[in-house]
Amino acid sequence: MNALRKLFTFNGGVKPATNKAESSRDPIVRLDQLPLPPQFVVPLHQSVGGIPQPLVTAGERVLKGQRIGGSDGNFSSAIHAPTSGTVIAVEPRVMAHTSGLTMLSVVIEPDGKDEWVEIQPLDWRSMDANAVRDWLRDAGVVGLGGAVFPSHMKLMAGRKTPMKTLVINGAECEPFITCDDLLMRERADKIIAGIRIMRELLGAPEVLIGIEDNKPEAIATMTAACTANADATIQTIAVPTRYPAGGAKQLIRVLTGIEVPHGQRSTDYGVQCFNVGTAYAIHEAIDLGHPLISRMVTIAGNVGQPRNYEVLFGTPMDFIVRQAGWKDDTNAFIMGGPMMGFRMPAFDVPVIKATNCIIAASPRLFAPPPPEMPCIRCGECARACPTDLQPFEMYWHSRAKNFGKVQEYNLFDCIECGCCSYVCPSHIPLVDYYRFSKTEIWARERQKNAADEARVRFEQRNERAEREKREKAEKLAARTAAARAASAAPAATTADSPTAPEAPAPTPAGDDGKKALIEAAIARAKAKKAEAAGTEGEAPVVEKPVRKVLSEEEKKALIDAALERAKTKKQAAAEKPVTEE
Ligand code: SF4
Ligand code: SF4
């Protein structure tokens, strides 16, 4: 740990009760210490970006770690089977989201064998950086701090500004949640291994690991792991405990002094930030070849034994909460902490990549909030806001559904930390108003985009129809010209014939073209006919000899005449005198 490093502060923030002691007492319950649930429901969309396409169908057998959802383009992340078994359905199921909406999911019935698909580590040092990023995309690695942004997208080396600092977020400032704390205590070496890969991909010369100073054990183990790696460029730094020190911009501010302005990104200043859980997942995906199929989850609140569990994605929340001692008066699950978390629509929604904590709520633990009172414009919310927004202005415009105005007050810079709601003396659930506004704005943008896409599709269809019509007309014209050329040859041979037709004049394609073809055919037929007629008139008439049929008397007379001619010839020969030679 670098005790001499100068730290900075961020504006606003609050100090709620941490409630972390209970769940951080015992070690993580590993995967091999847990039974498999009777069924896994694995939603295909678990990260920011495109929705992965299902790669399996009902009835198929899958192996643990097999890809069951292929990333939809590069800004997306793959999904894998959490265990071996049979796919019994690919259908919409209720999501782990407060909306209660459904999402296409792969439902798997485990076969109990927990049989891995063939896996292999990646020799990342000898590979092109893009190939390593592709590997991470296909391994389904996303940010595990809650944002679930595809990690391979964030691991691009600085485009405009060279990367200077890689910030690793181990602050874990939200009350009740201790999964990062336990991960750092138990698996520090593996986190450091992941950090080294990330640093290489980013080309960042410096790595700063920020951990809130209420986690002394994690600070100690991470410091020891840095020392063991003999890498002075990786430093573990304790930061003051103050919510929300774990916000990316807030931690960057504390560690580097850089204030990232509204509408800009930390990468514009050469800084990129990842959660410790993400670093661990990157090590698992590359050094072991294990895709992201599980994560650490804190089970806290109204349970007998609050603790951290390594949970396979798709596990029903009630199944894992029962392992920690479900209490009968539990009336809801909150995913995330009490400041930023969401109430789940059902007990059996699945654990997903964004599930860092499940708090079993009860009326005793979370009493119903006091009634909402009118805003008194005290300004407490603005003083508590760590992103220097004006929460009460955003509240007024959200309430009036004046969404354009809310955006003018930088609504989308709000990290929904809940500090404003926490301090509001009028008990106004301010964050709910901002979430409502964001949802409405996104919905309207989606509608607008859908309308724009429909318009573009309509225009493209019209263009295509016009083009096809034009091409058809051109083809027909070409055929007409070819037909005319073909008809020109016989026409020339019959040019002397009085009935030889004249070649048809060039005509445009279409009905006129067809007419021309027909006329040409008729002309050719006429010419042949005329030629045949002329030849027949000049031919000599050959009369066949007609044999006369004689009567018996005529035959006898002819015979008698022949005998008489012969008799006379014989007599004349006898009376002729003999002469000497
Ligand atoms: S803290 Fe509450 S009452 Fe005070 S200005 Fe903000 S919204 Fe209004
Ligand atoms: S929820 Fe938003 S507006 Fe309220 S304090 Fe946090 S960042 Fe500021």
Image (cartoon, grey):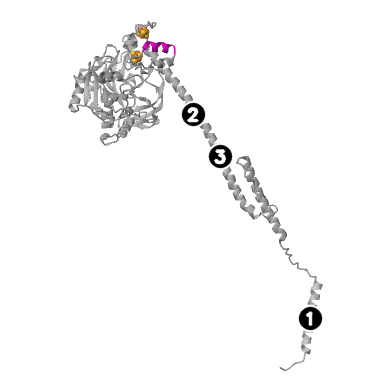
Describe residue 413's horizontal placement relative to residue 576 as left or right: left
Labels 2 and 1 touching (C-beta < 8 A): no
> Element under label 3?
helix
Which one is nearer the viewer's eye here, 216 or 355?
216
Queried on whether the Cβ of the residue with tag 3 lies below 8 angstroms from ligand 2, the answer reads no
Q: Quadrant of ligand 1?
A: top left
Marks 3 and 2, how far apart in space?
24 Å
Q: Which residue is mark 3?
A: 472
Q: Nearer the viewer, mark 3 or mark 1?
A: 3
Queried on whether the Cβ of the residue with tag 1 lies below 8 angstroms from ligand 2, the answer reads no
Please tell me the numbered disc located at residue 383: none
- Residue 531 sits inside the magenta stretch: no
- State which tag comes first along the sequence, 2 or 1: 2
Q: Which residue is mark 1?
A: 565
Report how many numbered discs are placed on residues in the image.
3
Residue 360: quarter of image = top left
Residue 44: quarter of image = top left
Q: What type is the residue that disc 3 sits on?
A: Lys
- State which tag comes first along the sequence, 3 or 2: 2
Q: Which residues are magenta?
A: 390-401
> Element under label 2?
helix
Marks 3 and 1, how far apart in space?
92 Å
The quarter in which the N terminus is drawn is top left
User: Can residue 6 be seen in this snapshot?
Assistant: yes
Q: Position of residue 398 (x, y in %)?
A: 41, 13
- Residue 398 sits inside the magenta stretch: yes
Q: Which residue is mark 2?
A: 456
- State which tag comes first along the sequence, 3 or 1: 3
Q: What type is the residue that disc 1 sits on?
A: Arg
